[in-house]
């Protein structure tokens, strides 16, 4: 067995230390070449992390706002699509009802009543739209459906208008039911109060204050329900009164359009606020990233040169170590 001298142990230790040092340096330089940032942060900031910590905290906050603006923008956009759909249906039905009323045709009135019933169901379903697990028109009760189904609503209204002898009586009863806290709000609306404002930037908030019980939305539902009563036997057998009911429903829907457009305009304002906040957040993020680069950036050419030099030194060390491992007395002599 060859005898290991003290010189061999010392030499082995030196080689191991050099090997570890070069590997650590290569790892650090590889990180710098890949990221463009120094791996010696403490040395670069001279031990003062106050500026860097402030930048990192602001960037983390802006990343959170990025998620919020994306989610709120999607929510506002989807709500806008829902309201536009309801508005288009209401407008089309208003014209259909007006044509049926002026024609005084029982067939056209019955057809308009059936159409109204279907459009009411469509409107209620639209108001129950969810984005992920969030019910859009339920206010704070985002886990609840916004409104009940058509059959439950119409059953309550049929009871409310029972005994009405004219179109005016039917409309008066429907108006009273929608105005009564025990009527529309208790039977149809299943959501909660409006949500609190959501932070979308360091100094801006977005508040979704549109729920399914908004007076403008309720007014459209009232017009749809009033017309739907034609499908549910209101003033049965009295064609003239049913024509009057169709006309009154058409007028209610027509009058509801302006307030309804104001609701969509409010949502449009929220969309614009979110979009502008997103742009400002992105601009601030870019500025902060530039500032961070100013503190931590390295010269990529210099880092790459140092990396190549360290890799060459490590390869040389391996070559020398391998050569010395092959030395023997025969080779020496």
Image (cartoon, grey):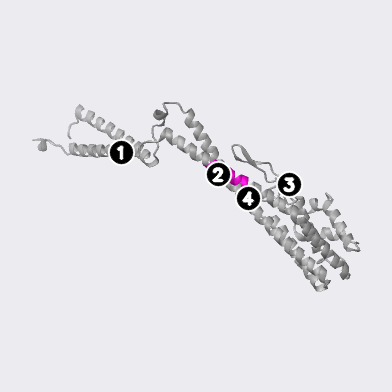
Inter-mark Cα distance, 1 to 3: 62 Å
Relative placement, left or right, of 56 versus 118 is left
Tag 3's secondary structure? Answer: loop
- Residue carrying label 1: 307
Q: Residues within 10 Å of mark 4 (few under 14, many from 20)?
A: many
Observer-nearest residue: 188 or 304? 304
Q: CA distance from mark 4 to mark 2?
A: 18 Å
Query: Looking at the image, is mark 1 or mark 2 earlier in the sequence?
Result: 2
Residue that appears at 51% across and 37% down = 59
Tell me, for residue 192, which label it has, or none: 3
Secondary structure of the residue carrying numbered label 2: helix
Would you call the spot at circle 3 few (<14 residues within 10 Å), some (14-19), or many (20 or more)?
Answer: some
Q: Gap in Å between the C-alphas at discs 3 and 4?
A: 17 Å
- Above or below for 182 versus 38: below
Find disc 4 in the rendering and name its residue: 75
Task: From the top left corner, tell me how far across and down residue 153 is, in percent.
Answer: 79, 58
Magenta-highlighted stretch: main secondary structure? helix
Residue interval drawn in magenta: 271-282
Is 65 in the magenta? no
Distance between the Cα atoms at labels 2 and 3? 32 Å
Q: Nearer the viewer, mark 4 or mark 2?
A: 2
Mark closest to the chain's N terminus, 2 or 3: 3
Mark 1 is surrounded, within 10 Å at the Cα level, by few (under 14), some (14 to 19) or many (20 or more) other residues, namely many
- The reply to whether residue 209 is in sight is yes
Quadrant where the N terminus sits is top left
Q: Quadrant of residue 68?
A: top right
Measured in 3D between alpha carbons, the distance from the residue under mark 1 to the one under mark 2, in whole angstroms, is 39 Å
> Reading the chain from its start, which is encountered first: label 1 or label 4?
4
Drawn side of residue 265 relative to residue 40, left or right: right
Q: Is residue 37 above or below residue 236?
A: above
């Amino acid at each position: 067995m060859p005898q290991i001298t003290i010189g061999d142990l010392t030499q082995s230790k030196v080689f191991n230390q050099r090997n570890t040092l070069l590997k650590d340096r290569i790892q650090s330089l590889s990180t710098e070449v890949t990221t463009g940032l120094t791996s010696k942060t403490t040395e670069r900031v001279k031990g003062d992390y106050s500026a860097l910590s402030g930048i990192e905290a602001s960037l983390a906050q802006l990343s959170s706002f990025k998620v919020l603006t994306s989610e709120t923008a999607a929510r506002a956009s989807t709500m806008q699509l829902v309201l536009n759909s309801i508005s288009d249906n209401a407008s089309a039905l208003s014209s259909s009802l007006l044509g049926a009323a002026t024609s005084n045709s029982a067939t056209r009135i019955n057809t308009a009543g059936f159409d109204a019933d279907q459009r009411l169901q469509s409107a209620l379903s639209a108001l129950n739209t969810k984005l992920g697990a969030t019910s859009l028109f339920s206010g704070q009760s985002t886990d609840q459906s916004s409104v009940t189904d058509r059959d439950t609503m119409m059953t309550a209204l049929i009871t409310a208008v029972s005994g009405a002898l004219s179109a005016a009586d039917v409309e008066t009863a429907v108006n009273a039911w929608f105005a009564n806290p025990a009527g529309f709000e208790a039977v149809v609306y299943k959501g909660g109060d409006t949500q609190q404002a959501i932070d979308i930037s360091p100094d801006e908030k977005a508040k979704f204050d549109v729920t399914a019980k908004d007076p403008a939305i309720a007014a459209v539902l009232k017009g749809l329900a009033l017309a739907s009563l034609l499908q549910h036997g209101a003033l049965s057998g009295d064609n003239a009164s049913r024509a009057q009911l169709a006309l009154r429903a058409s007028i209610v829907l027509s009058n509801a359009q302006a307030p309804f457009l104001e609701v969509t305009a409010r949502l449009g304002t929220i969309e614009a606020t979110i979009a502008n906040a997103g742009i400002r957040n992105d601009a601030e993020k870019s500025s902060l990233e530039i500032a961070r680069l100013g503190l931590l950036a390295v010269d990529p050419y210099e880092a790459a040169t140092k990396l190549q030099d360290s890799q060459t030194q490590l390869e040389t060390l391996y070559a020398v170590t391998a050569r010395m491992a092959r030395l023997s007395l025969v080779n020496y002599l």
